[in-house]
Image: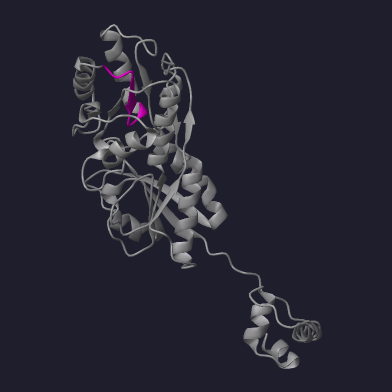
Amino acid sequence: MRDVARDAGVSPATVSKMINGRDFPTDAVRNRILAAITKTGYKKRKTVKVVRNILCVCPSDEAGGNTPHSIQMARVLESSGKKWNFIVSTTFLSGQDSIYSIIRERKIAGVVFMVNDFAHKIPIPAVILNEYVDDSFYPCVDCDDISGLFKIFDFLKECGHRRIAYFCDCRMSGKNSKPRKSRIPGIYERSGIEYSDELLWNEDFKFGEHRPVIRRAVRHFLDLKERPTAIVLAGDIYAPCFYEEMRLNNLRIPEDISIVGFDDFPIADMLHPPLTTVRKPLDAMAEEALRVLYESIESVRTVPGKILLTPELVVRESVKNV
């Protein structure tokens, strides 16, 4: 390259920028460089691709978060990592596991956290996927839950529902909760639906201990002076228990009460009737997490703190017009 620069009468940096497409000199300079390249027989070196080991951290079964969604996104991360010269491996951590030893032993260059409990500050780039974490050390890529709830409430309103209850879940408790709970009254207001505290069931509970909580929530909603005509669930995982409780109370879905979920777990389409819900853009979220992580590693640009992707409403048979 120095010979090319000398023959063309320019600096090596100018030659490098032109042949790598980072700068476009005047026609005269460009022609001199091209002539010098021909004269010297210069050939651009092939860029050596740097392959990096990336760790995807998923919650274990006992940690209560190994869901169909986390498995699907882990698969997308592993299959799409090649695009970024990543070799992605997945590990399932419990509360006793140490991520630091895994990073050292496997020579990890970056981490995708799919559980915020393990998103500690580490000395390498990382991104949090499918979790909303306040004041996180790392950028977050998540579904725009608020947008999804707007879609649900607007749809229910179009179906004639004006008395809508909402069942919160354990993900809405604590300092690292998703932003659904505090925004619920505003969602009612924005959708033109009257809100009252009695329509919101919010009880702290651990993952997997939701059955008695749902029983109490259903009893509360059904005992209201004016019953809701529809119940929105924070997650599809609670739908089977809600369906069962409604049957035990001799209520039919959707003839007597409508139910809407969130997440579009595989079970949503297997219920009777199939559950209307919100589908998260899981594949796109995983792809975006890889892009953000790549840019963090390469320091291409400052990565925004939070990236939200818009979900879609999936209308099935659990909602009726009133």
Which residue is more in the foreground, 210 or 308?
308
Q: How is the image coloured?
A: one colour
> How far from the left and from the top, in percent, is residue 263?
40, 33
> How far from the left and from the top, in percent, is residue 94?
26, 43
> How far from the left and from the top, in percent, is residue 293?
45, 58
Describe residue 229's horizontal placement relative to residue 25 as left or right.
left
So how many labels did they put on this image?
Answer: 0
Q: Is residue 254 above or below residue 291?
A: above
Describe residue 219's horizontal placement relative to residue 146 as left or right.
left
Which residue is more in the foreground, 302 or 54?
302
Residue 144 seen in render: yes
Q: Which residues are magenta?
A: 227-236
Q: Is residue 36 above or below residue 315?
A: below
Describe residue 151's horizontal placement relative to residue 6 as left or right.
left
Residue 140: within the magenta?
A: no
Which residue is more in the foreground, 42 or 297?
297
> How far from the left and from the top, in percent, is residue 254?
39, 13
Name the quadrant containing residue 18.
bottom right
Name the quadrant containing residue 179.
top left
Residue 77 seen in render: no
* Quadrant in which the C terminus appears: top left
**Residue at point 35% right, 11% down?**
256
Name the quadrant containing residue 217.
top left
* Quadrant in which the N terminus appears: bottom right
Residue 232: within the magenta?
A: yes
Which residue is more in the foreground, 25 or 105?
25
**Residue at point 38% right, 56% down?**
139
**Residue at point 69% right, 76% down?**
19
